[in-house]
Amino acid sequence: MINLDVLAIGNLHKDNYGKIIEAYSSSVLIRTDERMIVVDTSTRSMLPAIKASFKQIGVFPKDVDTVVLTHSHFDHIENNDMFENARILIHPDEQSEVAGSKPIEAGADLIPGVSIVHTPGHTSGSISVFVKADKNYAIAGDALPRYGNYVKMAPPAFHTDKEAALESIKLIIRYADVIIPGHDPPFLTNR
């Protein structure tokens, strides 16, 4: 059985002109009897919250064997060093941006029920993690950063390819019953 725990809920804080003044990503733990996988490690400011979540769940960061990064932006990777025994996986397009990381091919199953899906647009190497548990979950990173992107069918404000970003959002919505966005709380889709 696969369990998901949201370790930290991401957010974006903007000033009155829409400029981002603080950003930190969601961080998610995927647990099975054999594996412990963290998707995105967020920022240093979220380290206390992540540590508290691990304590509440009753799991130690040293037990995490894999970290999957949805992309290489700082607000998704700053706590990688917290997981000393984990291999760090990222799309090959972004591997050079994260020290010590290894490439993971989109389309691969990390374990049965946990798939890596290429969802470009925010960056060329953006990936999402699709999880088949009690529901279909999409850990979307910034391929679908906020609930508003879902409601408005709008690409991330920062994107490298608008059309690819919109196609990625559609792909995520087609799969997911629950979306865990990069910078908002999880939400149910209207499927």
Image (spheres, grey):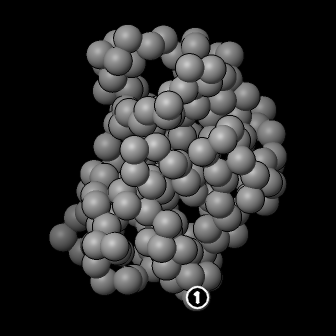
Q: Amino acid at mark 1?
A: Glu
Count neighbours of disc 1 (C-alpha within 10 A) and say few if under 14, some if 14 to 19, many if 20 or more. Answer: few
Q: Nearer the viewer, residue 139 or 134?
A: 134
Compared across the picture, whether 81 is left or right of 184 comes to: right
Residue at position x 71%, y 47% from top?
109
Q: Residue furthest bottom?
A: 163
Find disc 1 in the rendering and name its residue.
Answer: 163
Residue 153 on image: x %, y %: 38, 83
Q: In which quadrant of the rendered image does the C terminus lie?
A: bottom left
Residue 160 in view (yes/no): yes
Q: Residue at x 58, y 31 (%)?
A: 37
Above or below — where is 75 with respect to 49? below
Q: Is residue 76 left or right of residue 49?
A: right
Q: Residue at point 74% right, 59% down? A: 107
- At 36% across and 57% down in the image, what residue appears? 178
Q: Nearer the viewer, residue 138 or 12?
A: 138
